[in-house]
Image (cartoon, rainbow, N blue to C red):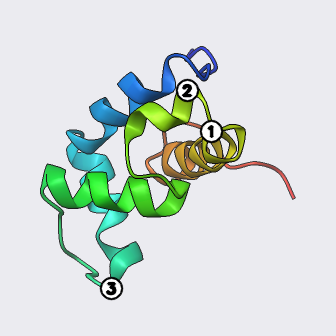
C-alpha cells in the first residue's frame, strides 16, 4: 500500500510521475491528445499547469499547489487502477 505523499516528498514524486509512461498516457488526453503518450517534458508541463506552479519545488512550499498535486495524483492513481475508485 502506498503511503500518503507529504509536501516535502511531493517534488520528488512529481519528477517520478513525469517519467512514468502511465502518467504520460494519463496527461496526453487531458491536454487534447486522446490516444497519445506525452514525452516527460510535456508530462512535466501538464503537472505544472494543473498545480499552478513554475517549478516542482513549489509543491513543498505552496499549500494550494500541494493540494492540487494531491488531487491530480489521486485521480491518476484511480485512472491507472493503482487505487480503487472512490465510492459515490
Q: Among all residues in the image, which is located at the extreme left?
A: 39
Q: Nearer the viewer, residue 62 or 35?
A: 62
Neighbourhood count class around disc 3 (C-alpha, 10 Å): few under 14, some 14–19, many 20 upward: few
Disc 2 target residue: 60
Q: Which picture quadrant has residue 66?
A: top right
Q: Are marks 2 and 1 in contact (CB under 8 Å)?
A: yes
Q: Quadrant of the N terminus?
A: top right
Q: Nearer the viewer, residue 69 or 30?
A: 69
**Eyeballing the image, is 27 above or below 13?**
below
Disc 3 target residue: 32
Q: Position of residue 26 (x, y in %)?
A: 36, 60
Q: Are marks 2 and 3 in contact (CB under 8 Å)?
A: no
Mark toward the start of the polypeptide (2 vs 1): 2
Q: Among all residues in the image, which is located at the extreme right?
A: 88
Q: Quadrant of the C terminus?
A: bottom right
Neighbourhood count class around disc 2 (C-alpha, 10 Å): few under 14, some 14–19, many 20 upward: some
Q: Is residue 22 left or right of residue 11?
A: left
Task: Give the residue displayed 58% in from the left and 37% down from the top.
Answer: 83
Q: Is residue 84 visible?
A: no
Mark toward the start of the polypeptide (2 vs 3): 3
Q: Is residue 17 left or right of residue 86?
A: left
Neighbourhood count class around disc 1 (C-alpha, 10 Å): few under 14, some 14–19, many 20 upward: many
**Eyeballing the image, is 12 above or below 28?**
above
Task: Give the residue displayed 55% in from the left and 26% down from the top.
Answer: 60
Is label 3 in a helix, a strand or a loop? Answer: loop
Q: Is residue 21 left or right of residue 82?
A: left
Q: Which picture quadrant has residue 47?
A: bottom left
**Eyeballing the image, is 15 above or below 48?**
above
Q: Position of residue 14 (x, y in %)?
A: 38, 35
What's the CA distance linking mark 1 and mark 3? Answer: 24 Å
Task: Give the residue displayed 35% in from the left and 78% down from the top.
Answer: 31
Disc 1 target residue: 66
Amino acid at each position: 500500500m502506498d503511503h500518503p505523499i507529504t509536501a516535502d516528498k511531493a517534488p520528488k514524486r512529481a519528477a517520478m510521475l513525469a517519467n512514468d509512461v502511465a502518467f504520460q498516457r494519463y496527461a496526453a488526453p487531458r491536454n487534447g491528445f486522446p490516444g497519445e503518450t506525452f514525452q516527460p517534458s510535456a508530462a512535466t508541463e501538464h503537472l505544472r499547469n494543473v498545480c499552478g506552479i513554475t517549478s516542482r519545488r513549489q509543491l513543498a512550499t505552496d499549500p494550494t499547489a500541494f493540494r492540487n498535486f494531491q488531487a491530480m495524483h489521486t485521480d491518476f492513481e484511480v485512472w491507472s487502477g493503482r487505487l480503487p475508485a472512490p465510492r459515490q
